Image (cartoon, rainbow, N blue to C red):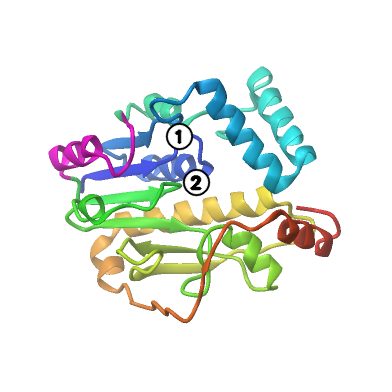
Amino acid sequence: MKIAMLTSNTALSGKVILRRLVAGGLTPAAVIIERSIPDGINPLAGHYLLIKSKIKKWGWRYVAAKGARLLRGKIFPAGRIDHVTIHALARGYGVPVRVVPDFNSSECRDFLNDLLPDICTVSGTRILKPDIFRIPTRGCINFHTGLLPKYRGSDTIIWSLYHNDPVGVTIHKIAEKLDGGEIILEETIPVSPSDRYRDIYRKACERGAEMMARIVADPEHYLGNARNKYDPSFPVWKKAPRSIVAEVRKARGGRL
């Protein structure tokens, strides 16, 4: 079984999935990541725009606190994977890393065609085009922090909390419809009143990585039993505006 990973360089989900796969003897043949700052954009300007977008959504206090945690982790590393990139983590495991300008680029497509993986695990990427997700012989399977088909799209943890619905993880096949591929596994995760967003997301990543490893270890069973639950009557959730984030924070006693 030849496995490839497509993921963001800093996404916790990708790092946790990689760690789980390696621990289970399912070491990927390659990790593919996107260049963090697109060609033609000054790196300083790119980081400024990223920070500005985070402040707009979460508020400056949250962003400042997160920045302090990241800095503290670099100065006083605690052995957690939060403060390392997946590029560094993969190199530590001896897994080749390929950096591409865009997951839908010809460079990424050519690399996958040369690699010919049986399956690709996907987490924290942009929407993939058919000429990418159809390359692996068993397809691409995506880590999604939401229970499908109701919670397709973005910020599904926030929207689930906003509607007082269970928070969960879905592993599904990637298809042309956004988050509309066949569902392979779907499980809820416990959320306590004291949990902040980062705690909930970490639980989702850990559960999703465990689910992903189960699937990759026994693809005949899990992929063969995948079911189509696509329902177009449910909306595709967009990025939650700051007002929604504030309502969820207030409903949770100021903790998010």
Residue at image coords 53%, 69%: 151
The residue under the point 72% across, 54% down is 242
Three-letter amino acid code of the residue under disc 2: Ser
Q: Quadrant of residue 40?
A: top left
Identify the residue shown where x is 76% and y is 62%: 248
Magenta stretch: includes residue 91: no
- The residue pinned by badge 1 equals 9
Dot 2 surroundings within 10 Å: few (below 14), some, or many (20 or more)? Answer: many
Q: CA distance from mark 1 to mark 2?
A: 10 Å
Point out the stretch of residues depicted in magenta.
Answer: 98-116
Q: Residue sitting at 33 percent across and 36 percent down?
A: 31
Judge whether residue 106 is colored magenta.
yes
Image quarter of residue 237: bottom right
Q: Is residue 228 left or right of residue 61?
A: left
Residue that extends furthest to the front in the rendered view of this protein: 40
From the viewer's side, name the closer residue of 142 and 213.
Answer: 142
Label 2's element?
A: helix
Name the foreground residue: 242 vs 30. 242
| x and y percentages locating residue 63 in the rendered image | 72, 37
| Amino acid beneath label 1 | Asn
| Above or below, comparing residue 80 to residue 247 in the picture | above
- Classify 10 Å Cα crowding around label 1: few (below 14), some (14-19), many (20 and above): many
Q: Position of residue 118 (x, y in %)?
A: 20, 51
Percent coordinates x, y for residue 250 in the rendering:
83, 60
Give the number of the disc on residue 13. 2
Residue 253: quadrant of the picture: bottom right
